[in-house]
Each structure stands twice: as C-alpha cells, then as structure tokens.
Amino acid sequence: MAENKVPHIRNLILDSLPVAMVTMDTDFKITFFNNLAEHLTGFSAAEALGKPCYEILHSSKCDAECPLQTVATYGESATGLEAEFINRFQEHISVRIGTAAIEDDAGNFVGYLEVIEDISREKSLERERNNFQFMVAHDMKSPLVAMQGLIQRIREHHDEMSAEKREQYYRIISETGEQIEAQVMEFLEYSRQTSYKVKLNLEATNLMELLDTIIERHQEQAAAKNVSICSEHHSIPQILADPRQLQRVFENLLDNAIKFSHDPGKIAIKSRETEKEVIVQIEDNGSGIPAADLPFIFDAFQQSKSSSAGHGLGLAAVKAIIQEHGGRVAVISSAEKGSVFIVRLPKKG
C-alpha cells in the first residue's frame, strides 16, 4: 500500500515546484507534465502526455539550438538558457531553460528532463527601466531643449522679431508643453495602476452590450479615417467583471486599430465562448507589428521602431487590467498584414 503512494507523493512534490517541469522518453514524447507546465503552455497534462515535445513546447531554441538535441548528441546537460517561449494562446513569454538526461537505476538512458522557468516579469521590468530612461533622455529632453531654445531666441530678439514670428514661437512652445504634459499624465496613470494594482469593482457584466456601446462611440472617429467597424457576436453569457476597466481595455484596443488601419480600412470585433472563457478578438487590416517588436508589445514605454504611437503605456495597462481579471491578452500580427488582439476572460471572476 505504501509503495502505491510513492508515485502520488512524487507527483504532488513536482506539481508544487515553482517551475514548469516536463519529462520525455527517448523518442521525445512527453511522459510527465506538471501544473506549472500546464499554466505556461496553455495545454492540460491530458492533452500533452504522449505528444512529441515539439507539438507542445515552442521556444526560440527549438530549431537550430534545441537543448534536448544537445543532450541526445553529446550527453551534456544545459542550464540558464534564456529563450522566448510562445504558448498556445500566442503569448510571448521570456523563459530560462534547463535540460538533462534521465537515467534508470542501472545508469541506462531512458529519457529527457526539461525545466522551464518563467522570467517574463524580471525581463519586462528590465526592459521597462531601459525604455523609461530612453523616454526621459530622448522623448522628454529633446522637446524641453527645443522649448528653451525658442524662449531664449524670443528673449534675445524680442524687439526685432515680428509679432507673427513671436506668435508662431509661442504656439510651438505651448503645443510642446502640452505634449510633455500628456506624456507625464499617461505615465502617472500607468504608474498608479501598476504600483497599487488595478482595483476591480466586480459585477455581472454584459460584454456584448459593452462592446456594442464602444463600437457606436467610435463610429465617427472610424468614419473620419474611412474605416468600417463590424461586429460578430456569438451568444455569450454575462461575466463577473469590472465594466469600467474593461471599457478602458477595449477602447484602447479599438483606438489603436482605427489609428493603424489603412484607408480604406476594416475592423472586425468578434466574441465567442468556450467552456471556461469568453474570448474577444479585435482584428484590423492595418500596418501590423514587426516580428521583432511582438515579444515586447505589452511592455510599458515600449514604442515600435516602425511607428511614433505613444510609449506603449496603453497596451501595458490593457495587460494589467486583463491579468487582474484572471485573463490573458495576446496579439497575432505581421508587418503590413494587420493585427489581431485576443482577449480571454474567465466566465467566473
């Protein structure tokens, strides 16, 4: 009886580890999949067991630098390998990977062990710090220097300067000041949300009505850019959520979709449900997001090199709000082919 409990106790211990742990046989088919592996990948253990690892585990190391192949070929373990992991929901997650061979009591090779640690928060904070330093040094310093230069020019040449030229300088100074103020306010709002977490006031929320209201409010803005918005709602139930915060999420995503849509443009908003989730997709036919920017699109202060659209604080707030609801948000995109933002919310808060 005691012997029968050993596998159960072992699995209980492995499921309690703060890292994803996956074992595979000599054919790279998955034989064990702990709780953190389920959460990281989006696949249940029942779905993963018996499958080849390449069908479940997708990282930037899987092709030319596959660490399991290194174990198979050279018998060498690996630790501390940093990679970008893409899970079932198209979320890009920074991970640290370790691999090793598994041997039986007689020393015979019987399979592989892969340990995957989610370091996305650590990496995100590092990038946000660097992005913030760039924002202060470049996006705020440059306009401030320009303002000081104009003020100095007015001061030195006031008497010989025409009233029209002075008015032009005053207008530029005012607009630049408003731009800096908007950046500061955007940063303060994001800082408030992330420092104190998003405080949710949960209530029964009709998501279809909320989306329809947001679409109606944005019709004029879309029409001005020759963009049409269509919706495709399958019947979805009410969910327990904060309607005000979700309004912020979907208004932000729709604003971006309109902003980056081509002329003529088309935006499709679709909603559906699964057994446990309600899923909303916002799809546009716009400029898209370069592949190099995709892993960082939800970072604060992240600005795509291909656009001048803000500092990523809106999308960072979107992610914070959705995660506080217990949900997920991801994006599928490619340059010049448009983007699809996918929001997943649990039916029960």
Image (cartoon, rainbow, N blue to C red):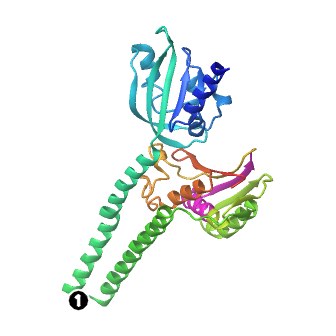
For mark 1, what is the residue?
Answer: 158
Image quarter (top left, top right, bottom left or bottom right) of the C terminus: bottom right
Name the amino acid type tagged 1: His
Q: Tell whether 177 sits left or right of 33.
A: left
Please identify the residue farthest to the left as the structure is shown: 156
Q: Residue at x 54, y 57 (%)?
A: 320
In the picture, which quadrant includes the N terminus?
Answer: top right
- Residue 186 point in image, percent of width and height: 46, 68
Q: Is residue 201 above or below residue 5?
A: below
Q: Quadrant of residue 30?
A: top right
Q: Position of residue 111 (x, y in %)?
A: 52, 16
Residue 188 visible in the picture: yes
What residue sits 57% from the left and 47% below the top? 331
Secondary structure found at label 1: loop
**What segment is highlighted magenta in the picture?**
248-274
Residue 312 in percent (x, y) is at 47, 58
Q: Taking 311 as reference, is 201 left or right?
A: right
